[in-house]
Amino acid sequence: MNSDQMMHYLTGLPNAGGYIKRVSDCIKAGTITEYTAFYFNLKGFGNINQRYGMESGDRILVQFTDKVKEFLMEDEILGHLGGDNFVALIKKDRKEKFCRLLNGIEVDLGTGTDNSKLKIQSTIGLWDIDEPFDDPGEAIGRTSIALQHAKHIMHVPVVSVTQDMLNKVSVQKNVLEQYQSALANQEFLVFYQPKVDSRTNTLVGAEGLVRWKHDGQMVSPGVFIPPLEQNGEIVLLDYYVLKRACEDIKRWISEGIEPVCISVNFSRKDLMDADLAQNIDRIITASGIDKKYIEIEVTETVDEQEHGELARFISDLYDRNIMTAIDDFGAGYSSLATLREFKVHTLKIDRSFINTKEFSWKDEIILRDIIHMAHGLNMDIVTEGVERDDQIAFINKVGCYVIQGFFYDRPLPVEEFEDRLKDKVYKKG
Ligand code: C2E
Ligand code: CA
Ligand code: CA
């Protein structure tokens, strides 16, 4: 590769290939642990391009780059991956100074007006390199993970990569690669979290929650569901969980254990599948169990198209005599129109409603009225995430009695849940 191919055409900085080569040189020289690796991009650069045009955008990038270059010492490296994405290796003792620099670099828009000057802030992912490593690509990979966290999860200007973030990303990568075989090898397990009537301390239902038993570890859905949803492959897992729940119910009946209704989650992304309701019906029917033992949980949506699909889905299930629940009601987007429009059987009040130390009179009025309305419309109410007895007292006071939460039980492996099914009365409470 000649040196032109290692440079970004606009800024003359090393591009990805050039930067990796320089990182690789530091690894070979044994100096890599003297550095902090950076990945940063410019806040609002898309808007700047849109507002002032690509040419101005390019001019701004060049000015920005010149100011960053001025900061660099001889053995520090700046790279330009493309667009407004930059990487750098900076000596550890100058890390804070570099962050301060990136926090506000002034550029001139060239409009000749009073407000021609613009301060540009960057969002930064960084990695303090404490151990030598072999693959120079990691200097980009790890800092990019930190940057994604800064932008999309933590919403702060600077984030250092942690082992936790790396583990999560590696599990996400694994799940996409191993999803099909994990399904075939039955590595996905269904745990059951009891729903309990707090007046009688009796088990009245349960929610099926998926876990991935991977390399001897139990991985929680928060880790593997988002990448599967993004990939559009989650529906296979949701069918699988439903099938397993139906099989368990069937087995309990055959063993003389009286089941309770099990609710199963379906992702909103599943709604793209036009045959969803029909397939659910087919799975329940094929298992031979009574439909009264299954309920389908879905969450609401702000997206208008999804809202239409959701309405059709719920009404389709209703026509097929399959019960539905609106999950996480009151979290994020919820609307009273939902109560009017959807033929749902159950409303699940989100944990955020009761996840407070003290309950205000406002909380009380809002919840009481929601519950009152839902009851008037013949819906059942379940409150989720109940951990303390003062939460139970509050929830009871506003008219809800069925509770799902750590107060009674965490999601349980099937064998443990069977013990609850055999003796449905809780001794505590
Ligand atoms: P969700 O449907 O809202 O499920 C309730 C979550 O709250 C569960 O987390 C449960 O363990 C947790 N939880 C229950 N009681 C308490 C409590 O008292 N305190 C606290 N802090 N948490 C409590 P989990 O099992 O990690 O599941 C997380 C989410 O993953 C679920 O939220 C659901 O959105 C999704 N999920 C789980 N299983 C499936 C599945 O089979 N298919 C799909 N599409 N999504 C699933
Ligand atoms: Ca749920
Ligand atoms: Ca929920």
Image (cartoon, helix red, strand yellow):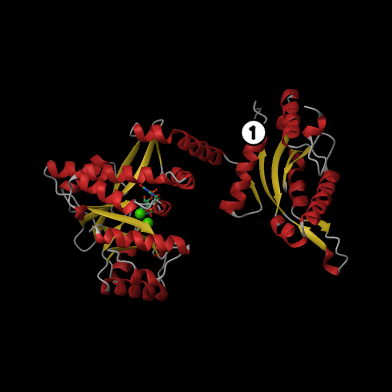
- Which amino acid does the dot numbered 1 rest on? Glu
Q: Is residue 112 above or below residue 369?
A: above
Q: Position of residue 295 (x, y in %)?
A: 27, 55
Q: Which residue is found at the position 42% from the left and 53% from the top? A: 272
Query: Which residue occupies the foreground of this view, 416 or 359?
Result: 416
Which residue is identified by label 1?
138
Q: Which of the image's four quarters has the C terminus?
A: bottom left
Q: Is residue 189 left or right of residue 135?
A: left
Q: Quadrant of residue 233?
A: top left
SS at badge 1: helix
Query: At 81% across and 44% down in the image, what residue appears?
Result: 10
- Residue 25 on image: x %, y %: 75, 26
Which residue: 45% across, 37% down? 175
Q: Residue at x 78, y 33 (%)?
A: 5
Look at the picture and state if 218 lies above or below 101: above
Would residue 235 be found to the left or right of residue 304 on screen?
Answer: left
Give x and y (percent) for residue 7.
79, 36
Quadrant of the image where one finds ligand 3:
bottom left
Q: Label 1 neighbourhood size at 10 Å, few (<14), some (14-19), many (20+)?
A: some
Count the numbered circles shown.
Answer: 1
Q: Position of residue 48 (x, y in %)?
A: 74, 59
- Hey, which residue is sitting farthest left in the picture? 256
- From what the image shows, is residue 114 above or below residue 263? below
Determine the residue located farthest toward the right in the rendered image.
112
Work out whether residue 386 or residue 329 is closer to the camera in this orientation and state it.
329
- Tell me if I can see residue 31 in this picture: no
